[in-house]
Image (cartoon, grey):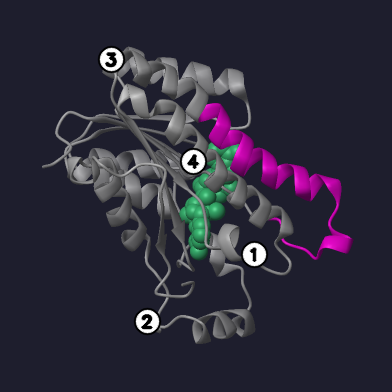
């Protein structure tokens, strides 16, 4: 177990990629704190992670609310005494072509994806700086690298996360805190289940490995980035996309 007694916070950890990351880190010995806006899924995820034999804090928290993020992080500190790992995973889409995109859809995506990442990183970084150690992984997207018609808001938020990652990596490096991003391609989750079959077929033609990614593909990459094996890697974006973007 390479994360024995480490403490990990995963946002949006109730399902999809976030839950897979929480389960993978728990398998490697980490204690887990997850937050999400979906209480039913949160409860199910808590039980699944506990079944791995780890203590779990699971709280309904909207990452856009800075005060609630502060309370959640304090609860994690009260329960576990420290935070070693932060995974900024909570994210949403509100797709639409630019000329039809309304302010609400632009703001919601930028708020959850980018502001949420800022809120959680800001609060957790303080605790990590005191310990002079930490690992932060931000879940971006290949769409934040290459863009996508109909996803201007999402692409801007994920491109922002990449730039944020590189900047914060420079700020926190002297405190022995590694900050990296993972940019998934297309992964089978609730988020991508809503795509039409035509869109899915078109995407598949652009994936050299010829298959969709799984949540475990992302969880395994995150595990590497929070382990000692990646100690000399910071400010990087690791693409997990089946070779789609080169
Ligand atoms: P899911 O929708 O399956 O899971 C995301 C989770 O985050 C949900 O439980 C969701 O709750 C929760 N969430 C949404 N808003 C908030 C909020 N404000 N505060 C806290 N939690 C919130 O998505 P995925 O697992 O597919 O995506 C996870 C991350 O990976 C996202 O950042 C996404 O952009 C990124 N990604 C995913 C790809 C894919 O192909 N699936 C590709 C590239 C990147 P609820 O369900 O109630 O909204």
Range of magenta residues: 94-120
In front of the other: label 3 or label 2?
2
> Considering the numbered disc 4 on the image, is that residue within a helix, a strand or a loop?
helix
Examine the structure image and report whether residue 54 is included in the region drawn in magenta: no
> Considering the numbered disc 3 on the image, is that residue within a helix, a strand or a loop?
loop
Q: Between disc 3 and disc 1, whose residue precedes?
A: 3
Label 3, label 1: how many angstroms apart (C-alpha)?
40 Å
The vertical placement of 87 against 66, above or below, is below
Q: Residue at x 28, y 41 (%)?
A: 226
Label 3, label 4: how many angstroms apart (C-alpha)?
26 Å
Closest to the observer: 177 or 70?
177
In front of the other: label 3 or label 1?
1
Q: State yes or no: discs 3 and 2 in contact (Cβ < 8 Å).
A: no
Residue beneath disc 3: 81
> Residue 49, located in which quarter of the rendered image?
top left
Q: Residue furthest right?
A: 99
> Considering the numbered disc 1 on the image, is that residue within a helix, a strand or a loop?
loop
Residue beneath disc 4: 165
Name the spot of residue 166 as percent of width and height, x first.
48, 41
Q: Between disc 1 and disc 2, whose residue precedes?
A: 1
Q: State yes or no: discs 3 and 1 in contact (Cβ < 8 Å).
A: no
In front of the other: label 1 or label 2?
1
Mark 4 Cα within 10 Å, few/some/many (few <14, many 20+)? many
Instruction: Using the image, tell me which numbered label, if any, was put on residue 209.
Output: 2
Q: Residue at x 36, y 58 (%)?
A: 218
Instruction: Using the image, tell me which numbered label, if any, was put on residue 147.
Output: 1
């Amino acid at each position: 177990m390479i994360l024995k007694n480490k403490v990990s916070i995963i946002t949006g950890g109730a399902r999809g990629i976030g839950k897979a990351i929480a389960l993978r880190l728990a398998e490697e010995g980490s204690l887990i704190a997850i937050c999400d806006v979906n209480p039913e899924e949160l409860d199910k995820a808590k039980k699944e992670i506990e079944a791995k034999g780890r203590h779990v804090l699971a709280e309904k928290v909207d990452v856009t609310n800075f005060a609630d993020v502060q309370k959640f992080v304090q609860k994690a500190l009260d329960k576990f005494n420290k935070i070693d790992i932060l995974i900024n995973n909570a994210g949403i889409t509100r797709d639409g072509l630019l000329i039809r995109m309304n302010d609400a859809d632009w703001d919601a995506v930028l708020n959850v994806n980018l502001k949420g990442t800022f809120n959680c990183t800001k609060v957790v970084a303080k605790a990590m700086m005191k310990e002079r150690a930490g690992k932060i992984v931000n879940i971006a997207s290949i769409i934040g690298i290459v863009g996508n018609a109909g996803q201007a808001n999402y692409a801007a938020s994920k491109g922002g996360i990449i730039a944020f990652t590189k900047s914060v990596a420079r700020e926190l490096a002297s405190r022995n805190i590694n900050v990296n991003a993972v940019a998934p391609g297309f992964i089978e989750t609730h988020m991508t289940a809503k795509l039409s079959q035509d869109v899915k077929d078109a995407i598949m033609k652009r994936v050299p490995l010829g298959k969709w990614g799984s949540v475990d593909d992302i969880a395994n990459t995150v595990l590497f980035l929070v382990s000692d094996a990646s100690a000399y890697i910071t400010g990087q974006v690791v693409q997990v996309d089946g070779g789609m973007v080169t």
